[in-house]
Amino acid sequence: MVLSLAERTAALVRHVNVEQILRRTNSGIYLGRSVDLGWGRVYGGQTMAQALSAAQQLAGPERRVHQFGCHFLRPGDAKEDVEFEADKLADGNSFGVMHVRAMQKGKVILSLTASLQTPEEGLEHSYQHRFTRDGAESALRPEWKRPEDCKSVFDHMQPYLKQIPKSLRPLYEIQQPLEVRPAEFTPPWDATPRQPVRANWIKSRLPLPDDHNVHERLLSYISDWGLLETSLFPHPVGMWSPGIQAASLSHNIVFHRPFRMDQWLCHAMYSPTSTGGRGYALGEFWSEDGELIASTSQEGLIRHSPPEQDAKL
């Protein structure tokens, strides 16, 4: 049975949350459910978002995340739940630092350190390059287009459904709760070299709860979608090309301003370098009115070898 969009949206909100199993003064244990998106291992954005949920719960409702960094240590099994062990490393008057370990079968698959702050007023500026967009100055580059001028990944992929591996097809057969509209669409099997830049407009298709923690988890969840792939663009391979091995190694997000994931955000990404079997990409989330919302960075394993070679991490 296919769930309605409202049911799938509610399920995603629950999915990026974790359930508290044990709570002490300075530590806690939480449980996250896994969902197989089609490739057998846990989607990195899931583990990040759930680890952030554990950090948020341990820090308390008066704190708000402003930065986290994580390392992916092992692939996660999508058939297994994930246990999160969270500890307070620091808990000052204004800032608290939480460390979270995501565990499966007694082994750490992800390590995340998050800094959370009690909101306060202070000096503020936003230095932005200015571009002419629709006849006016804007911080948004004209090549990012506007969301209403872009088609969703769902719409783009409909003519290619038979080309998509069966395990991944459910991702594209129905509309997902988070709509992604690329400024320029490139199928993941396209091996045409191009500039290592891309931009995706992203928004929940339905309204979301007012809890800022939910929006921060969902941004973390979707930030892993397509960022590392940008580092492949200058090379004659695509993400789904035979012989490609790709896996996140580290991921960082700085949250600059409050935002909502049920309003359009543009994730503008570029890859300044790839070397040594590692790709590196940077990103920025912009609001539709030109405010910088969050900054992202990711390093990942990128190997290209003949399919018969069984490369390992």
Image (cartoon, helix red, strand yellow):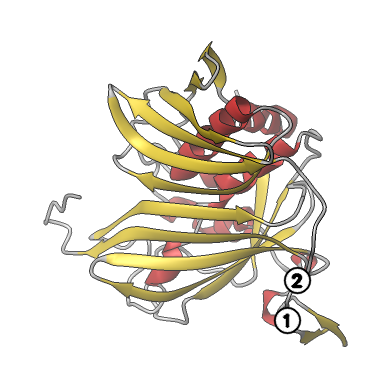
Task: Give the number of the disc on residue 202.
Answer: none
Secondary structure, mark 1, is helix
Q: Is residue 267 above or below residue 100?
A: below
Whether residue 51 is visible, yes or no, is yes
Q: Position of residue 262 (x, y in %)?
A: 77, 46
Q: Tag on residue 126?
A: 2
**Which residue shows up at 50% across the image and 38% down it?**
46
Outermost residue on the left side: it is 309
- The answer to which image quadrant residue 151 occupies is bottom right
On the rendered structure, is 266 left or right of 71?
right
**Quarter location, residue 97:** top right
Say which residue appears at 37% left-offset and 25% top-offset.
Answer: 79
Extreme residue in the front direction: 93
Q: Which mark, residue 142?
A: 1
Q: Residue 88's x, y, as percent?
A: 51, 30
Q: On screen, 40 above or below 254?
A: above
Q: Is residue 229 above or below residue 169?
A: below
Q: Amino acid at mark 1?
A: Pro
Q: Depth check: 274 or 124 in front?
A: 124
Residue 63 on image: x %, y % = 69, 36
Q: Secondary structure at mark 2?
A: loop
Horizontal relation, residue 309 to residue 313: left or right: left
Q: Could you tell me which quadrant the N terminus lies in?
A: top right
Return the x and y of residue 29 as percentages of the image width and height: 47, 18
Question: Label 2 sits on what residue type?
Answer: Ser
Q: Residues within 10 Å of mark 2 (few under 14, many from 20)?
A: few
Q: Is residue 227 above or below residue 54?
A: below
| Of residues 51 and 235, the one drawn nearer to the viewer in this rendering | 51
Q: Residue at x 48, y 65 (%)?
A: 187
Number of numbered discs on residues:
2
